[in-house]
Amino acid sequence: MFQCSVKREMDVPASVAYKCYSDREAIPRWMPFISTVKILEDKPDLSRWSLKYKAFGRDIEFSWLAKNMQPIPNQKIHWRSMEGLPNRGAVRFFPKDPSSCTVELTVSYEVPQILTPVASALQPFLESLLQRGLERFATFVKSYV
């Protein structure tokens, strides 16, 4: 598995960032490549994710079923895919002071067969996408307060 990690300082308390990121169905509002997240009504620890993005001259679409692992309130949200695109990850929240924090997003993934020819370019590309997502999250979470 390949791994990408990005972090960003936020001008909100860690508890606010954690609460906002815990709303999985809102994630497409700040992650530019996630098109939908739907929590399963009968199993709220499971969610179905769809990714759609145009990159490397292709329309890229993947989906997966994710299981949320036991969170650590105000500190860590983590998941792993159960089917579909193999991935796992974590979002960690580090308080800096009472009104700010650092959010770190780590995603581990297997390169899908269709993207094997561009695998070497995939990691820096994904890091850039994740960083832009965290920047959008920083703006989103400030409006949430």
Image (tube, rainbow, N blue to C red):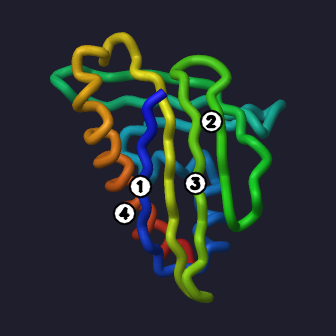
What's the distance in space between the residues labelled 3 and 2, CA to CA?
19 Å
Query: Residue at the location (62% across, 36% down)?
Result: 38
Q: Are marks 3 and 1 in contact (CB under 8 Å)?
A: no
- Residue at the disc numbered 2: 38
Viewer-proximal residue, 100 or 38? Answer: 100
All told, the count of numbered labels is 4
State the mark number for residue 66: none
Label 1 Cα crowd, 10 Å radius (few <14 / some 14-19 / many 20+) = some
Reply above or below: 86 against 88: above
State the mark number for residue 91: 3
* Mark 2 or 1, nearer chain start: 1
State the mark number for residue 135: 4
What's the distance in space between the residues labelled 4 and 1, CA to CA?
10 Å
- Residue at the disc numbered 1: 6
Q: Secondary structure at mark 1?
A: strand
Which numbered mark, 4 or 3, is in the foreground of this view?
Answer: 3
* Mark 4 or 1, nearer chain start: 1
Q: Secondary structure at mark 2?
A: strand
What's the distance in space between the residues labelled 3 and 1, CA to CA?
10 Å
Reply above or below: 118 against 94: above
* Mark 4 or 3, nearer chain start: 3
Residue type at mark 1 is Val
What's the distance in space between the residues labelled 2 and 4, CA to CA?
23 Å
Residue type at mark 3 is Val
Query: Residue at the location (77% across, 38% down)?
Result: 45
* Mark 3 or 1, nearer chain start: 1
Q: Looking at the picture, how far across and down is residue 72, in whole percent?
A: 76, 58
Viewer-proximal residue, 77 or 25? Answer: 77
